[in-house]
Amino acid sequence: MALIGVLAAPVAFSGDGTGGAAGSELLHHDVGVDYCVPLGPPPVAISETGGAYLWVACKIVNLSDHDDAVQVTPASDLLRTAVPDGCTAQSALLVPGRPNFVLLAGEQKSVLYRTKYECHAPAGDALVPMALTFAIDHREFFPDEDDSNTANDSVTLESNLVVGTPQTEPPPPPSSPGGMMAMSIDADPTGNAATDLGPREDCVEAPAGASVTVDVTAEGIPLYVDKGTPSDTTDDEGGAIAWAFLLRYSEAHFSVMGLEPHYLLAAGARSNVFSFPDIVPDTNENDRWLGAALDVGGGAPESGSGVLARLIISVEDFAPSGLYPLLLSRAVHFDAAGNAYSPHEVAGAYIAVGRSCEPLEIGVQLDAIGSAEPRDGTAAVTFAISCSRPVLVGVTVDIRQRRGWQIVHGSSMHLIPCEDTTSSTVSVEGAGKGFVAGNADVIVAATAESVYATVSAPVKLRGGRP
């Protein structure tokens, strides 16, 4: 991680306020910042309501031998630099849930902030260095004394805010180490594990009212290299200490019910993974949901391939049958030095509600011989519908026949259950004089699940029924 540390060694105090063992003991207080690391944000696209997120992860410690009441920086005071005109920044303290709490004797605790940047007109292209300050303060209660070592109470960080015109995805990094090869949705978690992936499926079937489980996976995270300076992470390369993505889907038909992040990021020794996604169940507001996790442990960053997160998605009771996409956008992982990289490839998946995942193929064949009934002016044609799986097919039959200087026209619509190949004969009533024996131009159009097939051909109508 790109850590900024300010922790100093604890100092023993004697009764006269100087170092040493003589005299009566004064209560010694020393709470401090071990390290802080800023992650992100990726570039903020103007008018993109999803925004871009900055995470700040810090570790604090109580170096004294007793419990102390402390306060960390409120979320509203984290940013010290004003955002450009047209931009907003909303910060939240995610861990712990409040700035005031008790830090136990010798305890180490993680602190995690999330800031959402969003920019709209009149904002323009800009690169703004944003200063951030994190601090921990010992809360003094009379006759208690204040922190005896204030040198380790605060740290100042810097994170660049990049604002620009919208783009569908950040460009992939030019070379490795950098972005992972792919971040994908696997619709079938079978065979997947923290550091191993089975064959990826891009579709899962579910009835309305059910739930499905899908994995967000990583492939080819570059190998972690510490550059031979274990105490300095700023020159490290590769590995992953955090990831984030926006899941885009139809919130009118689905809800994200849960996220489990303890897979690849938690695979190594001394991992300590925090997840900080959008709330679950989701709010059904904007067809997008943020997933994110960070490893604040002291182990080596993970690399390779495996599961980033497992999601549970419920299908609404009233969801109509159809094929619904699950898309990933603004996908990113952070390497050992805290640098953000987008994957070289991103792949989504589908949920098939009340239907099969199998791609549908349909075809139409038209018989060259039909019939005309002069008594009522109708014509009958025969056709065959083929389908790759059972489905209800909508069919339109259109017949045109020239009778002297007039064109007799008729059409009809039908719903035909198809299994493999289904032959049908339908009658069509002709307008005006009606159809008679002779040649006619016939069009048969079939459609099912947004798949279309059409045949157009001349048909010889014979007198009487076939």
Image: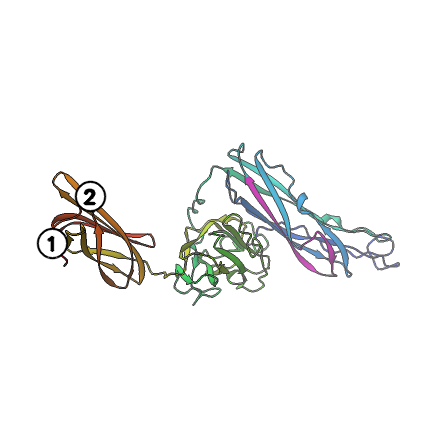
Instruction: Tell me, yes or no, whether the two marked residues, 1 and 2, touch with CB atoms within 8 Å.
Output: no
Looking at the picture, tell me which residue is in the foreground, 52 or 207. 207
Residue 463 circle label: 1
The main secondary structure of the magenta stretch is strand
Q: Is residue 324 left or right of residue 66?
A: left
Looking at the picture, tell me which residue is in the foreground, 26 or 290. 290
Mark 2 lies on residue: 432
Whether residue 181 appears in this view of the structure is no
Q: Quadrant of residue 408?
A: top left
Residue 243: x, y in percent?
Answer: 52, 54
Residue 160: x, y in percent?
Answer: 56, 41
Q: Is residue 110 magenta?
A: yes
- Determine whether the residue tagged by mark 2 lies in a helix, strand or loop: loop
Residue 195: x, y in percent?
Answer: 47, 64
Three-letter residue code for mark 2: Gly
- Determine whether the residue tagged by mark 1 lies in a helix, strand or loop: strand
Three-letter residue code for mark 1: Gly
Q: Within 10 Å of the Cα at label 1, are there few (<14), some (14-19), or many (20+) other Cα atoms? A: some
Q: Give the range drawn in magenta.
A: 96-118
Q: Quadrant of residue 161?
A: top right
Residue 366: x, y in percent?
Answer: 18, 55
Q: In this view, does 433 lie to the left or right of 319?
A: left
Q: Does the magenta stretch include residue 115?
A: yes
Looking at the picture, tell me which residue is in the foreground, 225 or 317. 317
Looking at the picture, tell me which residue is in the foreground, 248 or 165. 248
Q: Within 10 Å of the Cα at label 2, are there few (<14), some (14-19), or many (20+) other Cα atoms? A: few
Specify which label sits upstream in the sequence, 1 or 2. 2
Give the answer, above or below, for where 4 lies relative to 258. Answer: above
Q: Distance between the residues labelled 1 and 2?
A: 18 Å
Give the answer, above or below, for where 381 lies relative to 408. Answer: below
Residue at the front extreme, as displayed: 375
The quadrant of the image that shows the C terminus is: bottom left
